[in-house]
Amino acid sequence: MSKTAAPIAGRLQQFLFSPKGGVEGFLLVVDAADEKLIQITFSPGVGSELAALCKVSDMVTVICKQDRSQKAKKANHPVYALIDLVDESGDSLLPAGRNGRVDVDGTVTGLHFSKHGEPNGVILDNGDLVHLRPHGMKTVKPAIGARVHASGVLRSSVLGSRIVEAKNANGRKIA
């Protein structure tokens, strides 16, 4: 296998979970006759999106790159890092696309608060939570009824709702 990204098709055998319960990978049977397995890994945010799109025994096609780390070299099977989940025509099936980033626009309908009561994000009229962190809230100063345009990394809550971990909001960088 080359070092470049390549499509691989197979049957999803099982999801792999992190110690905190997030989906961080799956095993894929790529040769049914020999039951040859490979492992596909990804971040927990992408994992929840994949778990909503796929189920065990589904045939899937992934774009991935072989993990050449020292730990992966000691694995029981080849390990690959996911770049994308694609359909038959090669189009991305992940809502955030290949790089995991999304742009969202909406009207603020509510504020979100940290466990200590400090505002740390906004709820948009489409139900998305834009997580700005407390310092981002102070920088952007969003108010109920205001429009927010944000870009960041998409993940899902345990309730299945979308969370955007904002990197930029209303033209301001959120570090």
Image (cartoon, rainbow, N blue to C red):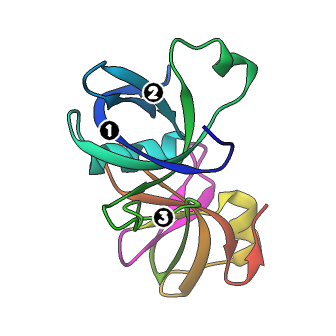
Write the residue at 35% across / 56% down.
161
> What's under tag 1, amino acid-wise?
Gly
Mark found first going from the N terminus, 2 or 3: 2
Q: Position of residue 127 (x, y in %)?
A: 36, 69
Residue at left 66%, top 49%? 4
Real-space Cα distance between discs 2 and 1? Answer: 9 Å
Magenta region: 110-127
**Category of crowding for the residue at label 2, using alpha-carbon neighbours closer than 10 angstroms: few (below 14), some (14–19), many (at least 20):** many
* Mark 2 or 1, nearer chain start: 1
User: In whole angstroms, how far apart are the C-alphas of marks 2 and 3?
Assistant: 24 Å
Amino acid marked by disc 2:
Ile
Q: Is residue 157 visible?
A: no
Which mark is drawn over residue 10?
1
Question: Hey, what amino acid is under mark 3?
Answer: Ala
Taking the magenta stretch, the answer to whether it contains residue 124 is: yes
Q: Position of residue 5 (x, y in %)?
A: 60, 50
Residue marked by disc 3: 96
Please report the residue visible at 35 percent of the width from the left and 75 percent of the height from the top: 126
Q: Residue at x 64, y 21 (%)?
A: 72
State if disc 1 and disc 2 touch (CB < 8 Å). yes
Q: Quadrant of the N terminus?
A: top right
Which residue is under mark 2?
Answer: 38
- 129 to the left or right of 3: left
